[in-house]
Image (cartoon, rainbow, N blue to C red):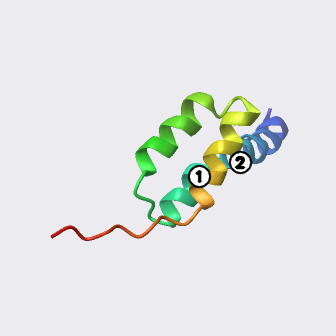
């Protein structure tokens, strides 16, 4: 019983970390669209395309906002 729990938690933690990697990157880069990236990652991250889109979006630099007079 103890042996199975020792092996279960590292794999579960690593899988969760990899699944939410785009959200973690967006949070670390203080992205403007953090909530949208997180929701995309949460709901469409199970598909490879949704995960890759969220990862690319999180890794891109934000365009500078233009000051309006």
- Whole-percent x and y of residue 45? 65, 34
Helix, strand or loop for disc 2: helix
Q: Residue at x 51, y 66 (%)?
A: 29
In terms of sequence position, does the residue under pointer 2 or pointer 1 come before the other? 2
Q: Are marks 2 and 1 in contact (CB under 8 Å)?
A: no
Up/down of 1 relative to 69, above or below: above
Q: Residue at x 65, y 53 (%)?
A: 56
- Whole-percent x and y of residue 58? 57, 55
Residue at the spot of label 1: 57
Q: Quadrant of the C terminus?
A: bottom left
Helix, strand or loop for disc 1: helix
Residue at the spot of label 2: 18
Q: Nearer the viewer, residue 52 or 65?
A: 65
Quarter of the view holding residue 3: top right
Relative placement, left or right, of 52 versus 7 is left
- Whole-percent x and y of residue 7? 82, 43
């Amino acid at each position: 019983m103890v042996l199975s729990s020792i092996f279960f938690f590292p794999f579960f933690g690593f899988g969760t970390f990899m699944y939410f990697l785009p959200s973690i990157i967006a949070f670390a880069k203080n992205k403007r669209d953090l909530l949208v990236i997180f929701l995309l990652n949460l709901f469409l991250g199970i598909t490879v395309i949704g995960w890759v889109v969220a990862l690319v979006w999180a890794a891109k630099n934000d365009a500078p906002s233009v000051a309006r007079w």
